[in-house]
């Protein structure tokens, strides 16, 4: 696929996320009217892996509404969020102001992050929970991450497991609740086109741009991109929990997240690396 075609698909995704943003801001899924609790989007093991963030420069790539970005600021980090959606950045800025959090937000495509952030370099770069699937080129992404990290700086990825993505979207009413493989687990097959008026949250239909494109990335793709960019892999975790109830049969965990009673399959993975 040519660079021009990649750019076209990325622009379609940007327009789609602009259109999704007002639906997400008003949704019960994010629960912004109930208080800005960014901590609820983190698994307990994430804080173990991230360590003390007080006084650290933390960059959150593909931050959307900045719900997790706020948690970094609350833990004493100098937090920066970056997203390509102008609507998302505007909403994140408003949410941060209402919460009294000191967070900087930058509108830019991940692939333009070095130029958009100028001379800034970071101790920690965080990304995930449905971010990497919107990037066609992980090799280029990892190289940009490495350039943005200070020597010794850490990358932390908390992403949906490729198996979860392969199981496809939540079944529509009447489809049954079987766990069915609907997409490839392995990457490299090209973008998956979606044309959907509904997003993963509750609320009304999306108005405007409904087309989006996702790329499947296996864990090996991520690991190889990170190590190929000169970073050192320190830890890889797999988890059977999600921060929301993906399937009706999921039950609450002691951490307040959700898991399937059976089968026990990986739904998330956490990757820690350093420059």
Image (tube, rainbow, N blue to C red):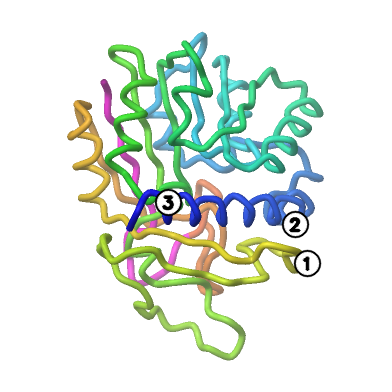
In percent of width and height, residue 250 lies at 50, 68
Q: Quadrant of the N terminus?
A: bottom left
* N-terminal-most mark, 1 or 2: 2
How far is mark 3 from mark 1, CA to CA? 33 Å
Q: In the rendered image, which quarter is residue 40 located in?
A: top right
Q: Quick check: 275 left or right of 183?
A: left
How far is mark 1 from mark 2, CA to CA? 7 Å
Label 1 element class? loop
273 in magenta: yes
Relative to 206, does residue 223 appear above or below in the rendering? above
Are there few (<14), some (14-19), or many (20+) residues within 10 Å of tag 2? some
Q: Quick check: 227 left or right of 40?
A: left
Q: Residue at x 53, y 52 (%)?
A: 243
Q: Quadrant of the C terminus?
A: top left
Q: Which mark is residue 4?
A: 3
Label 2 element class? helix
Magenta residue span: 259-275
How far is mark 3 from mark 2, CA to CA? 30 Å
Q: Which residue is mark 2?
A: 23
Q: Which residue is mark 1?
A: 204
Label 3 element class? helix
Q: In the rendered image, which quarter is residue 228 located in?
A: top left
In percent of width and height, residue 269 lies at 34, 48
Relative to 147, does residue 250 appear above or below in the rendering? below
Verify CB contact (< 8 Å) between mark 1 and mark 2: yes
62 or 173, nearer to the observer: 62
Q: Quick check: 46 left or right of 266?
A: right
Q: Residue at x 73, y 28 (%)?
A: 96
């Amino acid at each position: 696929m040519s660079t021009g075609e990649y750019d076209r698909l990325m622009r379609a995704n940007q327009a789609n996320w602009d259109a999704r943003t007002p639906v997400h801001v008003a949704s019960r899924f994010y629960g912004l009217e109930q208080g800005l609790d960014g901590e609820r989007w983190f698994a307990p093991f994430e804080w173990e892996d991230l360590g003390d963030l007080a006084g650290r420069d933390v960059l959150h790539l593909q931050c959307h509404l900045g719900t997790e970005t706020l948690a970094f600021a609350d833990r004493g980090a100098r937090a920066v969020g970056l997203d390509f959606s102008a609507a998302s950045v505007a909403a994140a800025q408003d949410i941060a102001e209402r919460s009294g959090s000191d967070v900087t937000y930058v509108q830019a495509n991940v692939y333009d992050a070095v130029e958009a952030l100028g001379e800034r370099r970071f101790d920690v770069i965080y990304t995930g929970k449905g971010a990497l699937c919107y990037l066609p080129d992980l090799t280029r992404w990892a190289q940009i991450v490495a350039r943005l990290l200070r020597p010794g700086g850490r990358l932390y990825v908390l992403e949906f497991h490729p198996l979860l993505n392969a199981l496809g979207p939540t079944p529509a009413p009447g489809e049954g609740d079987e766990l069915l493989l609907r997409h490839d687990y392995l990457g490299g097959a090209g973008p998956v086109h979606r044309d959907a008026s509904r997003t993963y949250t509750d609320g009304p239909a999306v108005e405007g741009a409904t087309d989006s494109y996702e790329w499947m990335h296996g864990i090996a793709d991520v690991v190889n991109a990170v190590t190929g960019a000169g970073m050192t892999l320190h830890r890889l975790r797999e988890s059977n929990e999600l921060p929301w109830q993906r399937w009706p049969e999921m039950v609450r965990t002691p951490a307040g997240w959700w898991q399937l009673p059976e089968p026990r399959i990986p739904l998330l993975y956490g990757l820690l690396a350093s420059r």
